[in-house]
Image: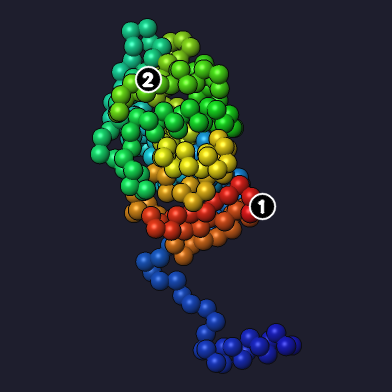
């Protein structure tokens, strides 16, 4: 009876207890308890992959209307060696991370080497080409400020390799920020303040601002993602 009385009082005072959704607003409810990480080197679940798709840029992309067509995103172009074992990538100039740092081949090499070294769930996407912790430093190598080589253990269909480079694990992250966090925690998964701001410019901070929320059973906090207030994302709440 107390609850009913309180509800009646609330309605009497406010005139309404529900607000209509504006006609130009879409409300979505997500089940996000499958998120275990927002690190592109570890993401292998649906929800995190969807978030990553709106937060990170990869080397290669594909046309969602015709998946037989791939195109360069971070990569501007690529060539295949005569023996088919090496892909030489050229990085698109003029791209910047949200940090303001320029995107170069050094960042792409760091990102791929890191993913192989961490060896998390999606690492097989890269290690199937003969890459391992022991050889990745020599197999993925920078050849210029905006170019790098990916050497594989044998001749694979270039289209297959390129499609693998559309995966989240082929996201390019900011090496300068990665070096800072690595000095604090090693080559691990705690990516500190700049986690969600590694890649895309400020207009991609849609994940942030007032939308801080607790994610998953580990209650990870997805904080703000702006250039001035970088996100705090830890592997432990």
**What residue is shown at x 53% (from left), y 27% (from top)?**
116
Residue 32 x %, y % = 58, 52
Tag 2's secondary structure? strand
Pointer 1 residue: 217
Tell me the number on the disc at residue 44: none
Residue 122 x %, y % = 55, 31
Q: Determine whether label 1 and label 2 are within 8 Å by CB.
A: no
Q: How many numbered discs sit on the rendered protein?
A: 2
Tag 1's secondary structure? loop
In this picture, residue 187 sits left or right of residue 103: right
**In the rendered image, the vertical position of residue 5 relative to residue 24, given as above or below:** below
CA neighbours of label 1 inside 10 A, class few (<14), some (14 to 19), many (20+):
few
**What residue is shown at x 30% (from left), y 18% (from top)?**
79
Q: Residue furthest left?
A: 94
CA neighbours of label 2 inside 10 A, class few (<14), some (14 to 19), many (20+):
many
Pointer 2 residue: 149
Quadrant in which the C terminus appears:
bottom right
Q: Residue furthest top?
A: 83
In this picture, residue 98 sits left or right of residue 230: left
In primary-sequence order, the first of circles 1 and 2 is 2
CA–CA distance between discs 1 and 2?
A: 40 Å
**What residue is shown at x 48% (from left), y 27% (from top)?**
113
Q: Nearer the viewer, residue 118 or 166?
A: 118
- Of badges 1 and 2, nearer the viewer stands 2
Quadrant in which the N terminus appears:
bottom right
């Amino acid at each position: 009876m107390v609850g009913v009385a309180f509800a009646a009082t609330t309605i009497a005072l406010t005139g309404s207890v529900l607000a209509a959704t504006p006609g130009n607003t879409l409300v979505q409810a997500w089940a996000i308890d499958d998120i275990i990480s927002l690190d592109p080197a570890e993401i292998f679940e649906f929800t995190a992959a969807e978030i990553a798709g709106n937060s990170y840029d990869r080397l290669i992309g594909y046309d969602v209307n015709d998946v037989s067509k791939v195109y360069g995103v971070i990569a501007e172009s690529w060539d295949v060696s005569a023996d088919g074992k090496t892909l030489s990538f050229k990085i698109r100039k003029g791209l910047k991370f949200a940090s303001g740092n320029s995107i170069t081949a050094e960042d792409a090499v760091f990102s791929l080497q890191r993913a192989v070294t961490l060896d998390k769930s999606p690492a097989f996407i890269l290690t199937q080409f003969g890459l391992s912790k022991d050889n990745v430093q020599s197999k993925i190598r920078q050849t210029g400020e905006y170019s790098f080589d990916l050497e594989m253990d044998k001749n694979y269909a270039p289209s297959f390799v390129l499609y693998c480079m559309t995966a989240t694990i082929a996201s390019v992250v900011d090496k300068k920020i990665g070096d800072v966090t690595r000095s604090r925690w090693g080559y691990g998964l705690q990516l500190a303040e700049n986690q969600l701001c590694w890649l895309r410019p400020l207009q991609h901070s849609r994940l942030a601002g007032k939308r801080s929320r607790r994610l998953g059973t580990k209650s990870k906090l997805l904080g703000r993602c702006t250039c001035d207030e970088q996100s705090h994302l830890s592997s432990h709440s």
